[in-house]
Image (tube, rainbow, N blue to C red):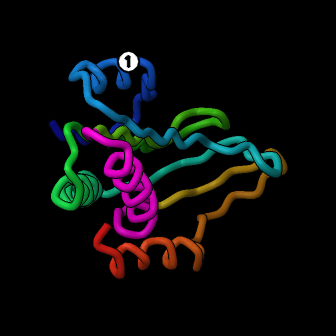
């Protein structure tokens, strides 16, 4: 089962994990990404494309499912306005054994930073506002998956 969602509402991590794990899979791996409050950050706003963003997430999920033997995959990304501590992204992958689940989660997090149409704007307590640029390290992590079949 593959589940992909994009939305402005809060991600209920506990409920999503319970739903995902209902299948009784042998191994599960997870990643929960949250808004950091570094440097006085007060808001992170994620802009997205209403068609291309969900399509990009679905494509990545399908690629992970084709690459590894996954029993279940959940990929949820939040958009809109978020405060420090709020969940931005949740990735859950389950398989018969841990290696596939762990690899799928790492692949999805590495690739969604570069492959999915999402733009981040930060606002700070001192009045600064700016768009976040991709880092070279994001591209290097994503590119390593092109060189590796597992």
Q: How far from the left and from the top, in percent, is residue 100?
A: 32, 51
Q: Is residue 18 above or below residue 57?
A: above
Q: How far from the left and from the top, in percent, is residue 64?
A: 25, 57
- Which residue is under mark 1? 15
Q: Is residue 5 visible?
A: no
Q: How far from the left and from the top, in percent, is residue 68?
A: 23, 55
Q: Residue at x 16, y 58 (%)?
A: 66
Q: Nearer the viewer, residue 101 or 38?
A: 101
Which secondary structure class fits the magenta region best? Answer: helix
Q: Which of the 4 image quadrants contains residue 67?
A: bottom left
- Count of marks overlaid on the render: 1
Q: Report whether 24 appears left or right of 7.
A: left
Q: Nearer the viewer, residue 69 or 88?
A: 69
Q: Residue at x 29, y 31 (%)?
A: 26
Q: Report whether 135 appears left or right of 89.
A: right
Give the SS element for disc 1. Answer: helix
Q: Where, quadrant-wise, is the C terminus in this rendering? A: bottom left
Give the crowd class for mark 1: few <14, some 14-19, many >=20 residues within 10 Å.
few
Q: Is residue 11 above or below residue 15?
A: below
Q: Where, quadrant-wise, is the N terminus in this rendering? A: top left
Q: Is residue 15 above or below residue 144?
A: above
Q: Nearer the viewer, residue 36 or 80?
A: 36
Read off the magenta span: 95-118
Q: Residue at x 43, y 44 (%)?
A: 79
Q: Is residue 17 magenta?
A: no
Q: Report whether 46 appears left or right of 135.
A: left
Q: Which of the 4 image quadrants contains residue 56?
A: bottom left
Q: Is residue 117 magenta?
A: yes
Q: Residue at x 38, y 18 (%)?
A: 15
């Amino acid at each position: 089962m593959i589940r992909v969602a994009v939305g402005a509402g809060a991600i209920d991590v506990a409920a999503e994990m319970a739903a995902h794990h209902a299948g009784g899979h042998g191994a599960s791996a997870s990643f929960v990404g949250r808004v950091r409050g570094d440097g006085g950050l007060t808001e992170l706003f994620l802009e997205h494309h209403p068609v291309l963003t969900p399509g990009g997430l679905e494509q990545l999920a399908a690629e992970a499912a084709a690459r590894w033997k996954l029993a279940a995959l959940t990929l949820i990304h939040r958009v809109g306005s978020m405060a420090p501590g709020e969940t931005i992204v949740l990735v859950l992958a389950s398989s018969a054994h841990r290696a596939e689940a762990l690899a799928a989660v790492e692949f999805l997090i590495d690739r969604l930073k570069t492959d999915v149409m999402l733009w981040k704007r930060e606002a700070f307590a001192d009045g600064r506002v700016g768009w976040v640029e991709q880092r070279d390290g994001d591209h290097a992590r994503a590119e390593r998956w092109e060189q590796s079949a597992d």
